[in-house]
Image (cartoon, rainbow, N blue to C red):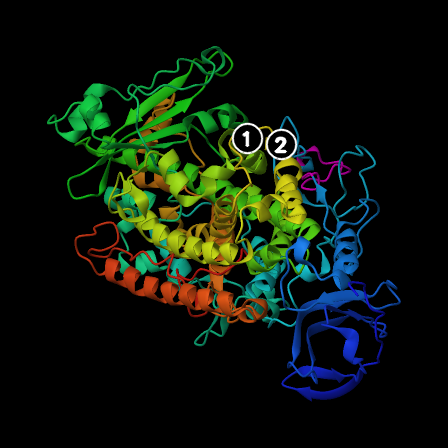
Amino acid sequence: TGLEKPSIRSYAHRGLDVDGDTYYEADFEIPEDFGEVGAILVENEHHKEMYVKNIVIDGFVHGKVEITCNSWVHSKFANPDKRIFFTNKSYLPSQTPSGVIRLREEELVTLRGDGVGERKVFERIYDYDVYNDLGEVDSNNDDAKRPILGGKKLPYPRRCRTGRQRSKKDPLYETRSTFVYVPRDEAFSAVKSLTFSGNTVYSALHAVVPALESVVSDPDLGFPHFPAIDSLFNVGVDLSGLSDKKSSLFNIVPRLIKSISETGKDVLLFESPQLVQRDKFSWFRDVEFARQTLAGLNPYSIRLVTEWPLRSKLDPKVYGPPESEITKELIENEIGNNMTVEQAVQQKKLFILDYHDLLLPYVNKVNELKGSVLYGSRTIFFLTPQGTLKPLAIELTRPPIDDKPQWKEVYSPNDWNATGAWLWKLAKAHVLSHDSGYHQLVSHWLRTHCCTEPYIIATNRQLSAMHPIYRLLHPHFRYTMEINALAREALINANGIIESSFFPGKYSVELSSIAYGAEWRFDQEALPQNLISRGLAEEDPNEPHGLKLAIEDYPFANDGLVLWDILKQWVTNYVNHYYPQTNLIESDKELQAWWSEIKNVGHGDKKDEPWWPELKTPNDLIGIITTIIWVTSGHHAAVNFGQYSYGGYFPNRPTVARSKMPTEDPTAEEWELFLNKPEEALLRCFPSQIQATKVMTILDVLSNHSPDEEYIGEKIEPYWAEDPVINAAFEVFSGKLKELEGVIDARNNDSKLNNRNGAGVMPYELLKPFSEPGVTGKGVPYSISI
């Protein structure tokens, strides 16, 4: 008839328990002319919510009907509305069977909510808000207030609205509470085992970190000598004063808590990170400092130098002379006088880590904070004939302050004297702290976690659960909103882990907003466009992946482009199956509303930018989807799962520099102290004991894969498996990912590739798709779930 049939009711009675699952059974009498089953409505008559895994309807002539649910169903006493679950067959809006059109539309209305009131734990409402919950506005402590992120002044992606009480002092702010709402099915599933890494992060933040703070008496105490740093890995931090808390700590981070049998003492004993296991002194060397810009934790910052001389774009009236002090003579002297600077620029031999203009406006503010010293920095590298980078110079700048003029100084590695060599090591420590902070706040938090949340909200508000694009994206969004809510609660909040351990202090998240406004572009989140935008690649149809790399041995880009192509081919096969004609894209109301909401609401502070891709053809959609799933899988894995391997030995990645350069306006006494004990100057510059151990604990937990991690292409989603074309495309996708494992192994064994092979060099494995559980430095999960 083309009309919706009256629904048929039945009660489900509890049946058997098998392997921890409880089966409920019901009998339906369905008339022959009922037609195909399109959806099932579920009412939970218990007083508690229930997790419904799947529903199978058996007894039809044409076989079983499978309905994958994986969802919490609220009690009817909490909310009388029934839950709707659609069958595993996917439909574009225009192709929806008429019997379920009404249900499809009603379900989306439910998920959008009405934007008022405080969200309750059982609700599934997706809505937007600004970041107005990081500080404690009603507190009497002025140090606990933070600006609102999101809006003209501090642009930012939107987060999920919780509707918590507004502040009494300033109703633009939301008050903080121990419960942070996320839509019910976004929460870490109780069905997952307790070893799920997200739960471990929660526990580490709420138990291990306070325990450390109570054991280390002086928060400003540094490490007196290098053996004291080594002792973290062979003696440990004594926890004997925590008798009541020890057992809970052991359950949270068993990898780190060891019982020393001879003494019976419990200690927090850190595992030696892979970097120092292979070469204890690699962190000290320039060749490793340079290599890590291409194969380390933050491969997203290195850029090609395209103009000489270097100049700041900041206002000289405020920040002083814009010209860099890195001179032509210095560079030519460092590269050996067989090439001019102009030739080096023209031949694409000079590269830069440039944190000058981003950080300089924050230098004087940060320097007022206790225990952090900041400069604007530029670091120049030269591409050697061996394909490796050689550091040539570091420039550190302080803008004018009070009656002091701008201060800037250039340090180079080839000072063949002891004083110059130690100043270079200190300058490197400052640059590494800048790179660590940028990595954590921008490459990691902002560009993956934070920018993905609006995609998740829009997908649930605008795409029906039976939409094929919803089903393509869904595995890439698992648990991201919950881990982000946890970050707002205890990582990026006022005086949280990030602020207390990274150089910008209370300006940390604000700095990520400045970077979002100045740098973030959706089109350049696609890996090929990102490499082109940094001058690291140019289009060339004759090269693999259609790109010629400026540095041929660039492990992140080499492996990343193979992974990008595999993802893109899978998305292409999927999209072309559901959109065989171009006009289906523009006529898909849900899809157009989804893309419009991402641009105009979720990333609304950027809505007028000219670079947003159009969505008119299947190719447009393929580009947009591939970019989103690259960010949640490859990009996130590359900047997250190596955190302990590279940052666990903190002299390799200090998160803060606590003392100024000895050459910046020194007193006679300060200079004398540096000359007599330069090693102590470096140790004073490094993070304090509590900063280092807190960060090491968190990095260990963040780098961990749980036993039930879900890696890309490993297992097929039930609704993909039902369609033979998609099933076949997935088999190809999965096979290509297994091939990539072998490609990466072969590259790591190639002695010509000096940036991933050599004496004591860590192989580059961050983009290997699969991994065993634990801290492995490899494995690409579908989603940002840690």
Q: Magenta part of the protein: which range?
A: 130-143
The mark found on residue 517 in the picture is 1
Q: Secondary structure at mark 2?
A: helix
N-term-proximal mark, 2 vs 1: 1
Spot occupied by residue 195 in the image (x, y as percentages of width and height): 56, 70
Residue 129 highlighted magenta (yes or no):
no
Q: Is residue 770 visible?
A: no
Mark 2 lies on residue: 605
C-beta proximity under 8 Å, tags 2 and 1: yes
The quadrant of the rendering that contains the C terminus is bottom right
> What's the amino acid at mark 2?
Asp
Q: Kindly indicate the quadrant of the structure image that contains residue 73.
A: bottom right
Q: Residues within 10 Å of mark 2 (few under 14, many from 20)?
A: many
Residue 558's place in the image compared with 252, above or below, is above
Query: In the displayed image of the protein, which residue is found farthest to the bottom?
Result: 16
Q: Please state which amino acid type lies under the numbered disc 1.
A: Gly
**Residue 390 - label:** none
Q: Estimate the x, y position of residue 350 in percent, counting from the top left.
A: 25, 31
